[in-house]
Image (spheres, helix red, strand yellow):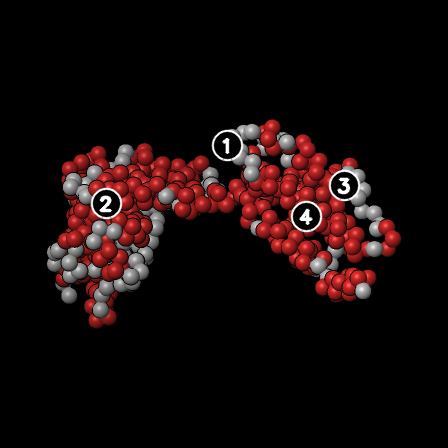
């Protein structure tokens, strides 16, 4: 998985002379807007991919984000960081698509497994034997299925904390809620994931049984 | 602390966000409460299991084509001024500057250059030299310098005519007859042979370097498969242009002409004439 360390977390602007480039883009300089896209495309795509879990939807979401940015760039007042603004647009785009399309947004279980296996195979340079690959595929399916069981908000909060490594305070700012809400949403998400994954305890190597819970 | 208070700290504990004081109380409670300890351990394992999520990385081509896929959608923005739309199109049309395309072009050029170099190294010199008439003969009457100068001038003159014919050849018109390819190749072979003699005998680094550069180009011409090898011809033409070969020949010719003008000799001639008149 692509780590979310493209500069945003450390407060380092992704784009050099960001304010100047944004100002030029606001004035209708299309090449400046392209600079913005080139600088942020990976950041937006990886966030979208972590949220939705598949490549095609992630690209759709990321392109929707840039279309929205293009159309509303003049509304960016600079109250927050530009990266935060783009992230917020990404989250809102994901949530609105997720709610609209519900189940069809996320890929079929078999596709999940295939993509998961491709990632595994790529990293291990196809050294894994067929049995290992099949096991990896199953684990990938279980994880995506478990994430599918979360509500859009639970999924968003969990992904932001777990895969994007955002602090609870940052998540609260991004979603415009309190830290307490983030904490309780995250707790619910973890409990639900635990419950979903308990069916696959053996495959996932979970040791602590929950029969006494 | 009570179990309810401890459960509220689970998330912070899982993500290592407890203060040291909270951590102390939290750990102490887990040691004495099996229920909380089990639930916490399960949540921790759940997190570890979720860490195993890995998604495939898009290939580089995906990123390179990203803007080109986005641009048509931007164009559809309602009320977008025409000048923005035109500029968007321009930005997309400049595809040659995309890293992937540039890389492909660079690789193609390197491969062609490598092919020519290897071909020249393995086949050309021996083949060409074996079949060529021997021009490098000793000069008569010991007038070595004059003899070399004359041959150099002749060599440059013939090379220039040959290269001009090639440079002016328009491959788009495909007028191969006008190129007189077979004749040009024969001349090239002769000149390659002549270059061997001149390189050993001419003085001056600039002239030697020019003759060497010319030799390579002439070898390339001599080794062209046919007059229809447009890529090869274009490559040679670009080499002539890039190295400024024709300009260097002109400069060398000017230099040779001025060198042949010897002021002392002119004065001597003039004095002798005056004496005769006297």
* Residue marked by disc 4: B156
Discs 3 and 4 carry the same chain letter? yes
Q: Nearer the viewer, mark 1 or mark 4?
A: 4
- Percent position of residue B213, x then y: 65, 50
Q: Earlier in the sequence, mark 3 or mark 1?
A: 3
Q: Label 2, secondary structure: give it.
A: helix
Circle 4 marks a residue in which chain? B
Left or right of B47 on screen, residue B130: right
Q: CA distance from mark 4 to mark 2?
A: 55 Å
Residue shown at the point (81%, 42%) measured from the top left:
B134
Left or right of A73 on screen, residue A49: right
- Percent position of residue B91, x then y: 32, 45
Q: Earlier in the sequence, mark 3 or mark 2?
A: 2
* Residue marked by disc 2: B84
Residue B172 badge:
1
Assess whether mark 4 and mark 3 are in contact (beta carbons under 8 angstroms).
no
Q: Nearer the viewer, residue B272 or A17?
A: B272
- Count of marks placed on residues: 4
Discs 3 and 2 carry the same chain letter? yes
Residue shown at the point (60%, 44%) measured from the top left:
B114
Residue shown at the point (60%, 48%) measured from the top left:
B246
Label 1 Cα neighbours within 10 Å, binned few <14 / some 14-19 / many ≥20: few
* Residue marked by disc 3: B129
Q: Label 4, secondary structure: give it.
A: helix
Q: CA distance from mark 3 to mark 1?
A: 33 Å
Assess whether mark 1 and mark 3 are in contact (beta carbons under 8 angstroms).
no
Q: On the image, which quarter does residue B265 sit in?
A: bottom right
Q: Earlier in the sequence, mark 1 or mark 4?
A: 4
Q: Is residue A189 visible?
A: no
Q: Label 3, secondary structure: give it.
A: helix
């Amino acid at each position: 998985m692509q780590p979310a360390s493209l500069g945003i977390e450390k407060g380092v602007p992704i784009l050099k002379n960001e304010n100047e480039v944004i100002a030029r883009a606001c004035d209708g300089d299309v090449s400046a807007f392209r600079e913005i896209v080139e600088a942020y495309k990976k950041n937006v795509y990886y966030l979208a991919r972590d949220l939705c879990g598949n490549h095609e939807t992630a690209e759709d979401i990321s392109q929707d984000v840039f279309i929205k940015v293009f159309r509303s760039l003049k509304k960016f007042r600079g109250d927050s960081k530009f990266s935060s603004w783009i992230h917020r647009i990404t989250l809102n785009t994901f949530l609105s698509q997720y709610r609209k399309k519900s189940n069809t947004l996320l890929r079929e279980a078999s596709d999940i497994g295939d993509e998961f296996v491709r990632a595994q195979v790529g990293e291990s340079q196809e050294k894994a034997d067929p049995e290992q690959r099949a096991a990896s595929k199953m684990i990938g399916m279980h994880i995506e299925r478990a994430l599918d069981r979360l509500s859009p908000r639970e999924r968003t909060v969990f992904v932001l904390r777990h895969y994007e490594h955002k602090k609870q305070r940052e998540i609260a700012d991004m979603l415009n809620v309190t830290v307490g809400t983030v904490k309780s949403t995250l707790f619910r998400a973890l409990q639900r994931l635990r419950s979903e994954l308990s069916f696959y305890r053996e495959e996932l190597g979970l040791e602590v049984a929950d029969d006494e819970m | 602390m009570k179990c309810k208070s401890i459960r509220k700290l689970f998330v912070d504990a899982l993500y290592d966000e407890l203060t040291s004081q909270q951590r102390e109380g939290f750990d102490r409670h887990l040691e004495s409460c099996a229920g909380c300890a089990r639930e916490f351990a399960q949540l921790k394992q759940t997190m570890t299991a979720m860490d195993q999520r890995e998604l495939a990385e898009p290939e580089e081509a995906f990123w390179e084509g990203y803007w080109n896929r986005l641009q048509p959608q931007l164009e559809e923005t309602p009320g977008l001024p025409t000048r923005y739309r035109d500029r968007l199109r321009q930005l997309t049309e400049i595809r040659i500057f995309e890293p992937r395309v540039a890389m492909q072009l660079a690789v193609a050029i390197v491969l062609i250059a490598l092919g020519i170099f290897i071909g020249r190294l393995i086949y050309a010199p021996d083949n060409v030299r074996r079949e060529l008439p021997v021009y490098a003969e000793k000069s008569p009457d010991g007038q070595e310098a004059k003899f070399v100068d004359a041959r150099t001038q002749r060599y440059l003159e013939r090379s220039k005519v040959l290269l001009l014919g090639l440079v002016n050849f328009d491959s788009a018109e495909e007028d191969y007859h006008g190129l007189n390819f077979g004749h040009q190749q024969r001349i090239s072979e002769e000149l390659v042979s002549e270059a061997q003699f001149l390189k050993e005998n001419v003085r001056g680094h600039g002239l030697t370097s020019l003759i060497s550069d010319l030799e390579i180009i002439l070898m390339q011409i001599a080794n062209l498969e046919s007059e229809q090898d447009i890529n090869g011809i274009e490559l040679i033409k670009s080499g002539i242009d890039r190295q400024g070969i024709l300009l260097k020949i002109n400069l060398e010719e000017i230099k040779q002409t001025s060198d042949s003008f010897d002021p002392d000799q002119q004065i001597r001639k003039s004095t002798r004439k005056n004496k005769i008149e006297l």
